[in-house]
Image (cartoon, rainbow, N blue to C red):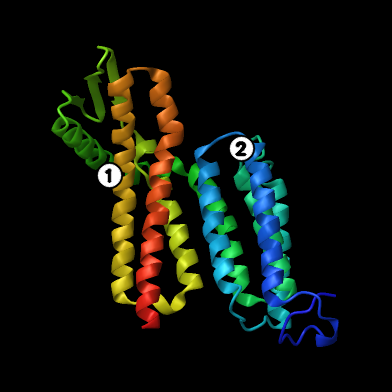
Amino acid sequence: MIFIKDSDDFSSKNKIFTYGQIIYLWIFLLITSLVIFFLFSSWSFFKMDAIIIWIFAIISLLYLSGKEKPHLETKEKIFFIVLGIGLVCLGILNIPLGFGHPPFSLGDFSIILSGLSVVYFSYFGYRLLTYPVLIPSVAVIGFQIYELLIDDFNWLSSLFIPIITYFTVFILQAMGIAVEIHGNLITFKSLNGELISLLITENCAGLWSLGTFTIATLIVLISFPFIINPKNIALIGIGYLGTFFSNILRVILIALVGYLFGTHSAVTFTHDYFGWMIFSCWLFFFWYFFLKITLKKTRS
């Protein structure tokens, strides 16, 4: 039997693991399983989203490992355990139900991991610890529902396309690149004389990035509820603006690679891999300084 310090559910005579050790053990298992699945699964944008969200969930668990929280009541514990088991079943049946797409992805695996995590922490009665590990499954399910209804969200993406196109053209022209624009189609010649055409579509609107930023925001606010105030909410608004402009920077980077190298393979590689590095750097940069500033003010 595993001991939880100050828990009414477990006897102090059976001390094996402390509160923090139980969390560290699960974090180790989470990271190990995510790394293994990441290495042996194919690349996708959604894969990077899932990793980023899990990183925030794990950081949240590390923070909470130093704090003891109220325990779940018996009825609450049963509810969360049933919820976790339901998530595991959903993760297994996700593709047959039509939410996921073959092959089995890190997103589908995240639903199972999230369900197992909820069962694990609910079993020990830790109410607050269930929230950070529950959010990755909510994010994956939300993104997959968005994929099913993507045609219904085209109106939202279309609002961003002219803005992204304008700033991209403006910055490229400011850098001395002769750019022609036809609606949302940008054309220019590379240094080696090849004609480069970039079409700004709904996939370039940055809704995925904004969605990921929103999930990260939820995890942070759940982990640090005491930082919620008008000034910090305004700072989070700046974070959303930065996320939007990081997407514009991603489009500009793709254009610059086309201008400098003039090859389709280089542009495709940048689009698929390096673009997400810009957003990831912004995300961790913003939340690092946000928490450094807000937590410092709270302590002082």
> Residue at image x 67%, y 68%?
23
Pinpoint residue 48: horizontal percent, then vertical percent.
Answer: 52, 44
For the N terminus, give its image quadrant.
bottom right
Disc 2 marks which amino acid? His
Pinpoint residue 299: horizontal percent, then vertical percent.
Answer: 40, 82
Corner quadrant of residue 75: bottom right
> Residue at image x 38%, y 80%?
298
The residue identified by callout 1 is 159
Corner quadrant of residue 227: bottom left
The residue identified by callout 2 is 101
Q: Earlier in the sequence, mark 2 or mark 1?
A: 2
Disc 1 marks which amino acid? Leu
SS class of the residue under badge 1? helix
In this view, the residue in front, 37 or 72, is 37
In this view, 98 is above or below 254: below
> Residue at image x 74%, y 80%?
4
